Image (cartoon, rainbow, N blue to C red):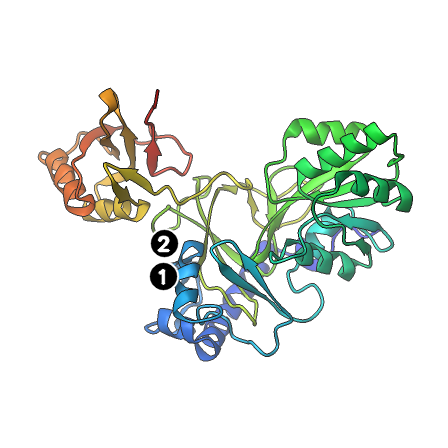
Amino acid sequence: MPQYYDSLEARDPEERERLLMAALPGQIAHAKRKAPGWARILADVDPAGVTSRATLAKLPVTRKSDLAELQRAERPFGGLNATLAQLGKVFVSPGPIYEPEGRGRDWWRTARALFAAGFRPGDLAINTFAYHFTPAGSMLESGALALGCTVVPTGTGQTEMQAATLADLQASAYIGTPSFLKLIVEKADELKADIRSLKKAAVGAEYLPPALRAACAQRGIRVLQSYASADLGLIAYESDALEGMILDEALILEIVRPGTGDPVPDGEIGEVVVTSFNPDYPLMRFGTGDLSAILPGQSPCGRTNTRIRGWMGRADQTTKVKGMFVHPSQVAEILKRHPEVLKARLVVDNPGGNDRMTMRCEVQGAPSEGLSQALVDAIRSVTKLRGEVVFARPGELPNDGKVIEDARKYD
């Protein structure tokens, strides 16, 4: 049996980087030429000059949280799509946000993750992701079909019928959320349905508890997870090594400080920003709103692409203080005015029931005279709220991706 989905997974990292950077100017030019939204967003960008991570980092970040407004202004996809007549499906996520699916084999690129989870030609898989409005069911089905699997589109709900279908068809594979897998297995036990044929599960869309993975392993079910989005398709996936998630081959990943487009050092938690090479929906520096961090080194499984720690929370930490919203981008604006601050975290608490903002700032050595008052003035100027400042040593603030911490307690 082949160890990898294709030879791309084990190629030299320097070759991968060189080819991605070489392809980047063409993709940016394609987006500007075919998608009016990107023509506006990247109006001042010369595609030929974007050939490195440093030059890519100068492009603006377009965030998932921007999509609803962009799409209201220009339907159906905010002008970010390069094709329309060639699309196969259009999905609707809460917001509403409209997501395109193109035509062709494995458009969402999920086959790579399913292969790593052990899916092979001939496997009979129940796909319990939703098939209506949202794209998850279609995303994973396309990958399973590309691998040569047979798919039973069970969709969500009807736990008893799901367990009976597993038993009657002797299905070998499960696709869906980990929590629904648990419910189906428990229902099968209750019904005394024989689901010993089930040997592999590809899960996603929510947290996978280690105890659930271990319990499934005891039953002979190997559970691996992937990380995908309705905009980008597959982003990263687990392998048997179970050491982080491996980036898909058709993407450029950056981890940036929340509220900014500034890449953070490897290992630091920040927002996942992805540039895709999808010709139908070419997303350039697309901020997912998810937090993660890059892991050092390569996976023990032999795959050589970048690894991330998986989903670690949300990057949009917007908080309402005294009736006014405070955004991560405002914290970033304050830091731009004071580059001597290495890192900052705005802590909101409520002693005595009154909201209070305190900006904890890491600085090298003793803070310069007047820096505290200058920061207090900047906080008021940017947020229109009063804030206090406390200094910290480099490395003292937690590495958790938070730039705004809501520490308020309510009785």
Q: Kindly identify which residue carries mark 2.
A: 261
In this rendered view, identify the residue nearer to me: 376 or 399.
Answer: 376
Relative to 69, is 190 on the left or the right?
right
In this rendered view, identify the residue nearer to me: 294 or 99.
Answer: 99
Image marks 1 and 2: residues in contact by CB distance under 8 Å = yes
Q: In this orientation, does residue 241 appear?
A: no
Q: In this view, does 252 lie above or below 157?
A: below
- Horizontal and vertical percent position of residue 24: 49, 68
Relative to 145, is 263 on the left or the right?
left
Q: In this orientation, does residue 324 appear?
A: yes
Residue at figure coordinates x 18%, y 34% from the top left: 387
**How dense is the environment of label 1, judged by Cα within 10 Å: few (below 14), some, or many (20 and up)?**
some
Q: In this view, does 19 lie above or below 222?
A: below
Relative to 243, is 222 on the left or the right?
right
Q: Distance between the residues labelled 1 and 2?
A: 7 Å
Query: Of marks 1 and 2, which one's residue comes earlier in the chain?
Result: 1
- Horizontal and vertical percent position of residue 122: 87, 54
Residue at figure coordinates x 70%, y 32% from the top left: 213
Residue at figure coordinates x 47%, y 73% from the top left: 31
Residue type, mark 2 in image: Gly
Q: Which mark is residue 60?
A: 1
Residue that protrudes farthest toward the left in the picture: 370
- Residue 54 occupies quadrant: bottom left
- Horizontal and vertical percent position of residue 235: 58, 53
Residue type, mark 1 in image: Pro
Residue at figure coordinates x 69%, y 54% from the top left: 140
- Horizontal and vertical percent position of residue 361: 25, 34
Disc 1 element: loop
**How dense is the environment of label 2, judged by Cα within 10 Å: few (below 14), some, or many (20 and up)?**
many
